[in-house]
Amino acid sequence: MERNFYDNRELSWLKFNERVLEEARDGETPLFERLRFVQIFCSNLDEFFMIRCGSLSDKARFDPKDRENKTNMTSKEQLSAIAKRVRALLPTKDSAYAEIMRGLSKYGVEHLAEDKLTPEEDAFLKAFFTREIRPLLFTGVVDKKHPVPFLKSGEIYIGAAIRKKTDPAGKITLGILPASENLPRVIFLPKTGKFILCEELISRYAKQVFSNFEIISRCIFRVTRNADIAPDEGLFDHDMDFRDIMSKLVKKRKKLNPVRLEFQGKPSAQVIGTIAKILGVKENFVFTQNAPLNMDFLSALERRLEKQSELFFPQLTPQRSPIIETGRSVIDQVRGRDILLNYPYENINQFIKLLEEAADNPQVMSIKITLYRVARASKIINALIRAAENGKDVLALVELRARFDEENNIGWSKRLEEAGVTVIYGLEELKVHSKLLLITLRDGDGVSYITQIGTGNYNERTSRLYTDLCLMTADRDFGSDASVVFNALMVGNTVESTNKLLVAPKGLKSRIVEFIDNEITYGAGGYIGIKMNSLTDKDIIEKLAEASRAGVKIEIVLRGICCLVAGVEGSTENIRVISIVGRFLEHSRIYIFGKGERRRVYISSADFMTRNTERRVEVAAPILDRGLADRVAESFEIMLRDNVKAREQGPDGSYRHVERSEGEAPLNSQIYFYEQAYKSAEQQDGSRLPDVSQASAETASAPQPTAEPPRHSTVKVKIKRIK
């Protein structure tokens, strides 16, 4: 009998964040880096509540009977399950934070408990509060004459149950003090690394502020508001520029309904109840914890500890790709052969050099690019501006709906426009998530192209933190396809047909399904390899299960959400899912279909999520160069053999660290790839890998897989328009 092989999207995401939290408890990870993983866990959870829980809350209010299409749970049932799971994870987070801080105290950095200060410490902090904090505080008392002040999402507040001293039997009211971002977050005691957080300081000396009141109890709290803004809400006003619409919606986000209420410590039930009632937050979405509510103070601690190298990961520097020759035009090199960069192991500056050359090259007529997330100090933007100032036709599609990067992108779009770049915002109903660049050159009486397709954003900062692939090619079919994509975007359309590229929403999913169907015809001789961030598309999941039942071997490396449960007898027993959570964020997308001569290898901007396959403009590109395809397949194989940072999904949907067999050498795939990058660089210019202690020695004996030759083929797509 076939068993259900689906996991709920939201609960699967919480399993991913639990894997992040496991890194905070890993004794092999340097101590301060463990603290960063606590911070990542918390910031991930903040965004999850703002977006996913915000959206589910809206559905629960306006469409309570709606059920998601995999586990058949209503929005209310999902919210209830989320609250239960989060409540179970918070003690683990608190424990991790306490353990890490105990370890850091040996290095002189100590988080003081505000109720256990020595008289000398108390005297200093009280004076500091009186002099530096008290004059800047805004005091709010909630009563008939003073309505509840607006509580900003994410800002920390001190709440106090207070009663007038002149009326000891009188009514207890609520006082609220903001520990706003204008105040110093961390207060260090003189000449030490001992510290207290601003909210804890305000809480301790709140009686100075409410001097006419008796403080019955006090607490530290924070509210999280729904941040799931819908751009469609503003599109009715067609007299407004879309950029202005997005600016208004970003401001609106800050005032949406609360979805979560958090307290630090052990506040009284009365205060919890009062604040929850004021905000309209249900009891199951009120959480208490011992660790700080916001972990954004880590940079202040890092400055105190930066000389203690053992607390941090060894510094690793992205290396120059051995494929690219120094002192020679990158444009000329790409014209000679396809080039593939692998971030963060190889340096994004080699791609930026291509763009900078294009800005100055007299043969270049135009540059077109899609921008989703860019760095705040962006060399890529500067190159585009320089190209426009040099008289090139430059088109930049800036996706203003890139979540939480809206304001940054709005600012860049204005600057690009001022420099003479043609700026467009994409399609009304579809986000443009592709990572696509097209450089058009005058080539005699005709034109030639250089096309770049990536799995990650044009962002120098994240290129050092995220694993991504960047393909640069002079293939004419790629350039023609990219030109079709940009021409469609300029007039608000989506692509109907392409030659080699797969372009969502009309020409990617259907082809993926065809490729899976093709592997099904080979039965046990079929093979599918997938690497991506998330898998939620039900049609593709069903097709993968069908392939598994036909005997096709399927291997998936997936960082985050996985709504498919592997290893379920009768459905997915031929599917293996692993998740790698380590020092770098796994972000590249790779699709492999078949083995031997019929193998197809693609890289893509698209996860197999319905939003990517049906509601975004995404691009996947085949790797046609035999050597590069081998390299991608080999890297995929190495990740499958990771037995240090990989967790394997079981048939119950849980994830457990991959166990090493007796005598098997440990393999950390991320460190292995950095070792290979340094070895290549050492052969060229003498760069040497820094000591990465155990991880470096362990991976030296990593297995070397044998890749099979790729298939060189042309993909033609003709799909009817989606209405």
Image: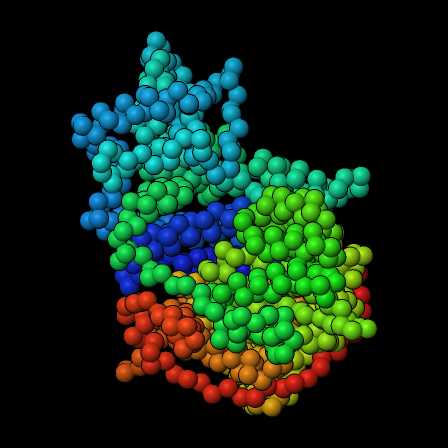
Q: Write the residue at 22% across / 24% down.
A: 123
Picture coordinates of residue 267 (x, y %)? 35, 33
**Horizontal and vertical percent for residue 704?**
41, 84
Name the spot of residue 589 as percent of width and height, x first.
Answer: 56, 69
Furthest residue in direction left, as rendered: 119
User: Residue 460, relative to residue 303: is it above or below?
Assistant: below
Total number of numbered discs in the rendering: 0
Which quadrant of the figure has residue 537? bottom right
Q: How is the image coloured?
A: rainbow
Quarter of the image holding residue 211? top left
Quarter occupied by the C terminus: bottom right
Please tell me whether residue 666 is drawn above or below residue 107 in the rendered image: below
Residue under the image location 75 percent in, 66 percent down: 483
Q: Is residue 692 left or right of residue 558?
A: left
Left or right: residue 86 versus residue 598 is left
Residue nearest the viewer, comparing 127 with 520: 127
| Residue 514 vertical placement versus 360 (above, below) | below
Q: Is residue 686 above or below residue 142?
A: below
The structure residue drawn at horizontal position 65% and vertical position 52%, both measured from the top left corner, is 385
Closer to the camera, 255 or 258? 255
